[in-house]
Image: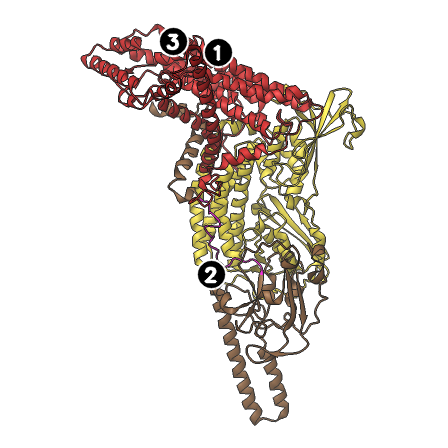
Chain colours: A red, B brown, C yellow
């Protein structure tokens, strides 16, 4: 953080900037020690501080794991309801608003639809769990388990707050994407275990989609790692600290290369979590049955839970890498605790996912893969070059800053337009003639 | 220069997508404050406002709510039974005659059944009825758990008073009442004139007068039941002939709803 | 895209009765959703897959079945199977009077009851030589154009639903449809089964309030279309999915008897409102949009452009509608017995040319009653449009043909 501050001071030597930087430092220090900020840690220590040393570490870790699972499983439940209600509101209708708990007083059993996730969960649990006799029983059982396990594993390195990262790894980003890629294995397990040629074909198609989009996903974060100088998620968040001119944060998304990288990352995470417009594997109007046909009941629900966990994890990583993690946009907003900021940013990204789902039709499998390989990968590679230029010119001052921005913008927009033109070569809005 | 950049940007890949996102966002935000963007009616807490012309299943109009079976306008002419496309009406004429609302001796329907599992609410029975006796009801909350006998509506269930007709189709009911009153007045005047002529003329003329009375007593034939056309059509004896023998009653209306379904 | 897949082979020897005699290994597999998958072994091309998109399916617009033979993902043969909604409409017509058949015509193309009614009334009026008063003609035009708006809006919504847009365009389309259906309900008493036209005019007159409401709706419709087009027309994903998909060449369209927007999207200038000039259409000024490529995108856009032309006609008709009777004074409601003869009455319905052919023998019931259903005839060309496309495209192509099974099966 001191690096960022000195960068702040170095960019402009005016008295005002220095004063603001010092004020920001004091504010940050105050915020970092505030009671609200330290609340989760003090709550945890209240329960475990009397334990002897190795046990304390174990119990602390377990509490962390349980907290993550509980929070994100409830977020999954609430997210399904929020998604349905937002989708409904976009479509001029209310979404579920009648499911409630009939025995609660004063609610007439309606509760604005808040009981819907509970009802869905109970429905899924009470469904008969049918496993085909020809299927590979062990793999059939393990596929949703493995999927869910790997998805939860990815949460370990996301910094949810100032001192709220479950596992502070030096190569956190690498670990995250490795665990994320392991989930693709579980998709294939699901298709293979069904012993159904058509499910297998569909699973291979889903796998092709996932693998195609791993590449832009990883390439889009290479610039972030390059400029932050560290693979650890905590280090990347710290590298985005400080404010320029007192109120503009140093988040990566507010730079030209960062914005492009963020867009590529966002599109790739849409595809990685099988969300519209890339939800071919789970489309109902697709004929050749998907890889999930042989699953029913709660195992089916687990696949969707894993999809939502993947969505949340990727959004969390996007917040960490591009949106400044748990940091507030302005210094005087630092009084709001860091985990609240993280949640706000996470929910914004999730709302973006839902918004996109509400608007766009689905892409066909060949169009999907063409988008990944012929559009996103070249753009991501160019972006690495732009980020390198940006990092090399970090000491340009004054009017050269404008030049730096202009060159970076041109270098980002030009390949986008050119490759975009080539990709959409055959398709364009048309004008029609009228009969005379 | 700005316009050229703007046009160039709008041709970029993704501009159509951004436009689409803007429309969706407008609807999302609008659904909270603009009733045009949130068009759901929360039934059954909110009931729909039905237009006056809305039709569901038919009902029989009675003049006097106190004596429904005695004051049905229906004279069992069986025209509606003949014209009904899916043949869901079953009528049996009475053997005797009873005085109707105006005091004349009239045949009445001893049995009048409508099979609502067959009726398609096409409203042709209303159109062809010469006596404004059958009209379309507006009740749509008629779901029942009894699939057979509850779907066959009998005469007692179908009879509803003229006040009810006024409440659901005010304009139509007023027009029908006015027309019936006018026709009754014309019939009365003719009867008075015929009685006066009879008092002063010899017998053959009286027979003609009686025949003329019988002719005039019958209200005009089917005119479009709802909105009036400027000149009422003259009576067409060939088309509205209640004395025609009734068509063979459809057996399905009475005792085999499963076959009719 | 289709050049990446092998050419469909037409000279392949396999059993045309469904391939059951050439099945190897797994014969038939029942998938959830009613789809049926069968492996057909073809010695020259490896395994072909015969899939039956079963009668219940979320995307087939009714009880309709497609037996599709796939080579990998490409369609090599497609056989439409329908008849699941056959209701003996034409035979019923022989046993019912002319008037009583009118409510049954509502149920043919159940989305467009007003135009079905008009086509039937036109045929009977030709048969009986029955004139129609002026106000009734105007009302017929107004209702027919409102029906065209209804139908094309519905199609736009469903086509986008089939491409996977999770219901948003569908809900917007139906929101507007409801406004027109409310108009129909306040006029004829029923939203969809209107039973409105009679031989010699219309059944119910339109009040000034109704005409004012119709005018208000027409004025607001362009705005809705602009918003809808902003959502859809420039959308790159939709363009990528529908352009150059399901191309129909004009000469093939004409020789197959295709009519309606499908024909005009292939570039053939044939619209019965201009060709026949039935009713009072020659008095209105409107243009006929034509497409150049004949693909799904053209079929969709032609319908949007036709909606805008319909709005023009509606404005002119609503301004010029005269006062007067709506039913010819000599029109008979009961006891209608046209003289022996035959007549074919046709109109440009929203889906194409809908026609009724009636033979009368002087009795109250027609001797022969035949419907020319546009959806049925437009469906015959489905296989030619779908060959060489993938199965995902087949669903979209079917959506763009715009069928209603009530009309296909009668």
Q: Nearer the viewer, mark 3 or mark 2?
A: 3
Q: Residues within 10 Å of mark 2 (few under 14, many from 20)?
A: few
Q: Which residue is mark 3?
A: A227
Q: Residues within 10 Å of mark 1 (few under 14, many from 20)?
A: some
Q: Which residue is mark 1?
A: A175
Is A423 positioned to the left or the right of A127 in the image? left
Q: Which residues are magenta?
A: B39-57
Q: Position of residue A121 (x, y in %)?
A: 54, 33
Label 2, secondary structure: give it: loop
Label 1, secondary structure: give it: helix
Q: Position of residue A74 (x, y in %)?
A: 47, 28
Q: As displayed, is residue C217 above or below residue A383?
A: below
- Marks 3 and 2 share the same chain: no
Q: Which residue is mark 2?
A: C323
- Specify whether residue A300 is painted magenta: no
For the residues labelled 3 and 2, the Cα–Cα distance comes to 78 Å
Q: Position of residue C216 (x, y in %)?
A: 42, 49
């Amino acid at each position: 953080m001191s690096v960022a501050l000195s960068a702040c001071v170095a960019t402009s030597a005016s008295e005002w900037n220095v004063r603001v930087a010092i004020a920001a430092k004091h504010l940050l220090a105050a915020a970092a020690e505030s009671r609200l900020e330290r609340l989760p840690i003090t709550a945890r220590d209240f329960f475990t501080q009397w334990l002897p040393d190795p046990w304390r570490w174990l119990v602390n870790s377990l509490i962390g794991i349980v907290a993550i699972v509980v929070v994100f499983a409830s977020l999954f439940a609430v997210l399904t309801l929020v998604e349905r209600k937002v989708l409904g509101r976009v479509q001029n209708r209310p979404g579920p608003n009648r499911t409630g708990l009939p025995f609660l007083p004063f609610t007439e059993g309606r509760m604005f639809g808040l009981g819907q996730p509970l009802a869905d969960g109970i429905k899924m649990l009470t469904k008969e769990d049918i496993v085909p006799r020809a299927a590979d029983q062990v793999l059939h059982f393990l596929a949703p388990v493995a999927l869910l396990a790997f998805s939860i594993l990815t949460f370990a390195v996301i910094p949810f707050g100032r001192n709220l990262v479950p596992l502070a790894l030096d190569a956190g980003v690498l670990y995250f994407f490795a665990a994320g890629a392991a989930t693709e294995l579980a998709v294939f397990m699901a298709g293979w275990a069904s012993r159904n040629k058509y499910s297998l074909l569909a699973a291979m198609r889903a796998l092709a989609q996932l693998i195609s989009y791993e590449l832009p996903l990883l390439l889009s974060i290479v610039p972030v790692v390059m400029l932050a100088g560290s693979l650890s998620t905590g280090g990347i968040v710290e590298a985005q600290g400080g404010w320029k001119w007192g109120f503009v944060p140093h988040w990566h998304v507010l730079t030209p290369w960062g914005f492009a990288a963020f867009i590529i990352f966002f599109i790739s995470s849409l595809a990685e979590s099988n969300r519209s417009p890339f939800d071919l594997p789970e489309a109902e109007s697709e004929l050749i049955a998907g890889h999930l046909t042989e699953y029913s009941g709660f195992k089916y629900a687990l696949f969707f839970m894993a999809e939502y966990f993947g969505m949340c994890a990727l959004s969390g990583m996007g917040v960490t890498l591009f949106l400044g993690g748990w940091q507030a946009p302005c210094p005087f907003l630092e009084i709001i605790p860091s985990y609240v900021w993280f949640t706000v940013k996470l929910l914004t990204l999730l709302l973006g996912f839902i918004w996109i789902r509400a608007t766009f039709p689905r892409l066909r499998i060949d169009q999907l893969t063409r988008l990944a390989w012929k559009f996103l990968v070249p753009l991501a590679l160019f972006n690495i070059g732009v980020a390198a230029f940006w990092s090399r010119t970090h000491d340009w001052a004054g009017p050269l800053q404008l030049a730096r921005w202009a060159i970076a913008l041109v270098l980002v927009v030009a390949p986008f337009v050119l490759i975009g033109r080539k990709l959409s070569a055959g398709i364009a809005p048309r004008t029609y003639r009228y009969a005379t | 220069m700005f316009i050229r950049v703007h046009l160039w940007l709008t041709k970029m890949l993704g501009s159509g997508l951004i436009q689409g996102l803007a429309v969706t966002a407008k609807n999302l935000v609008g659904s909270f404050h603009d009733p045009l963007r949130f068009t759901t009616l929360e039934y059954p807490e909110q009931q729909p406002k039905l237009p006056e012309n809305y039709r569901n299943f038919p009902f029989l109009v009675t003049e006097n709510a106190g004596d429904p079976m005695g004051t049905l306008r229906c004279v069992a002419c069986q025209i509606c039974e003949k014209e009904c496309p899916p043949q869901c009406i079953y009528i049996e004429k009475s053997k005797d005659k009873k005085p109707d609302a105006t005091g004349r001796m009239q045949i009445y329907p001893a049995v009048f059944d409508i099979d609502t599992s067959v009726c398609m609410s096409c409203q042709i029975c209303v159109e062809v009825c010469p006596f404004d006796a059958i009209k379309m009801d507006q009740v749509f909350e008629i779901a029942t758990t009894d699939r057979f006998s509850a779907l066959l509506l009998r005469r007692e269930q179908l009879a509803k008073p003229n006040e009810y007709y006024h409440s659901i189709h005010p304009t139509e009911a007023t027009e029908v009442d006015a027309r019936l009153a006018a026709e009754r007045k014309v019939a009365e005047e003719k009867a008075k004139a015929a009685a006066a002529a009879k008092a002063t003329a010899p017998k053959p003329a009286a027979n003609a007068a009686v025949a003329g009375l019988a002719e005039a007593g019958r209200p005009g034939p089917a005119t479009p039941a709802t909105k009036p056309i400027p000149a009422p059509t003259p009576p067409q004896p060939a088309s509205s002939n209640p004395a025609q023998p009734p068509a063979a009653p459809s057996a399905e209306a009475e005792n085999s709803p499963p076959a009719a379904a | 895209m289709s050049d990446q897949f092998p050419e469909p082979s037409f000279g392949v020897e396999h059993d045309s009765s469904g391939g059951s005699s050439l099945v190897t290994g797994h014969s038939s597999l029942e998938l959830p959703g009613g789809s049926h998958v069968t492996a057909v072994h073809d010695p020259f091309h490896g395994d072909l897959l015969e899939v039956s998109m079963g009668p219940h399916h979320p995307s087939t617009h009714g009880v309709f079945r497609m037996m599709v033979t796939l080579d990998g993902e490409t369609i090599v043969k497609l056989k439409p199977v329908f008849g699941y909604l056959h209701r003996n409409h034409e035979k019923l017509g022989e046993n019912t009077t002319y008037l009583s058949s009118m409510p049954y015509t509502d149920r043919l193309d159940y989305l467009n009851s007003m135009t079905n009614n008009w086509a039937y009334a036109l045929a009977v009026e030709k048969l009986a030589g029955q004139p129609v008063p002026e106000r009734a003609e105007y009302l017929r035009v107004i209702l027919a154009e409102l029906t065209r708006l209804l139908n094309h809006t519905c199609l736009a919504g469903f086509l986008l639903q089939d491409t996977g847009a999770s219901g948003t365009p569908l809900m917007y389309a139906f929101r507007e449809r409801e406004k027109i259906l409310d108009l129909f309900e306040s006029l004829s008493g029923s939203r969809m089964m209107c039973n409105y036209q009679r031989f010699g005019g219309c059944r119910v007159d339109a009040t000034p309030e109704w005409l004012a409401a119709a005018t208000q709706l027409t004025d607001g419709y362009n705005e809705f279309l602009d918003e809808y087009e902003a959502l859809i027309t420039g959308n790159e994903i939709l363009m990528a999915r529908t352009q150059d998909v399901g191309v129909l060449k004009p000469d093939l369209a004409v020789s197959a008897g295709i009519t309606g927007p499908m024909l005009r999207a292939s570039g053939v200038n044939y619209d019965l409102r201009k060709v026949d000039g039935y009713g009072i259409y020659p008095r209105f000024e409107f243009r006929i949009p034509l497409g150049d490529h004949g693909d799904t995108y053209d079929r969709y856009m032609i319908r949007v452009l036709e909606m805008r032309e319909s709005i023009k006609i509606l404005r002119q008709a609503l301004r010029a509608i005269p006062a007067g009777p709506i039913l010819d004074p000599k029109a008979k409601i009961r006891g209608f017995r046209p003289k022996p003869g035959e007549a074919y009455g046709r109109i440009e319905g929203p889906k194409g040319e809908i026609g009724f052919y009636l033979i009368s023998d002087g009795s109250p019931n027609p001797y022969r009653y035949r419907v020319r259903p546009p959806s049925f005839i437009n469906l015959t060309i489905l296989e030619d449009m779908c060959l060489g496309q993938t199965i995902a495209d087949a669903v979209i192509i079917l959506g763009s043909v715009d069928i209603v099974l009530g009309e296909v099966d009668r």
